[in-house]
Amino acid sequence: MSVALTSNITLDNSFAGELPDMAVGWQAEKVPDPRLLVLNELLAVDLRLDPAWLRQPEGVRLLVGNAVPGGATPVAQAYAGHQFGGYVPRLGDGRAVLLGEVTDAEGRQRDLHLKGSGRTPPRPTAPRRR
């Protein structure tokens, strides 16, 4: 379970709201002692995130998914595709956990994803070929 941040960051959840069958509420696995190694400050500014705040313990907890803003709805996304020779209408998401969406400096909506944040929901198995 993640805790809410005390910052003024807002994460929208339009993907989960507009496509509820393609998203499962999900939390990143807890990182016991997160440390920031590298921060892309230009990207942070473009996403209207304060680089100085992201360097603080609370900001680092956001970057690893240990803490999310109040009202945020992190999800694992589902997608469709071919797997093991058959079409599967709903696959699990091994790509990332979507923390939510932010609006960048130019007014564009951007996804804030975590890659490598632990297991996501199991994928349904593809039908066996006969």
Image (spheres, helix red, strand yellow):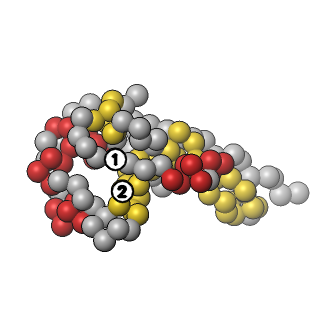
- The residue drawn where x is 23% and y is 55% is 49
Q: Nearer the viewer, residue 110 or 117?
A: 110
User: What residue type is disc 1 on?
Assistant: Thr
User: Can the viewer see residue 110 in this picture?
Assistant: yes
Q: Work out how far the residue at label 2 is from the one at label 1, CA to CA, in angstroms.
A: 7 Å
- Which quadrant is home to the N terminus? top left
Percent coordinates x, y for residue 8 in the rendering? 25, 43
Please tell me whether residue 119 is drawn above or below residue 1 in the rendered image. below
Q: Secondary structure at mark 2?
A: strand
- Which disc number belongs to residue 10? 1
Q: Do labels 2 and 1 touch, CB within 8 Å?
A: yes
Q: Residue 102 has which mark?
A: 2
Point out residue 4 in the picture as x, y percentages from the top left corner: 32, 32
For residue 79, the mark is none
Residue 78 seen: no
- How dense is the environment of label 2, judged by Cα within 10 Å: few (below 14), some, or many (20 and up)? many
From the viewer's perspective, is 54 left or right of 92?
left
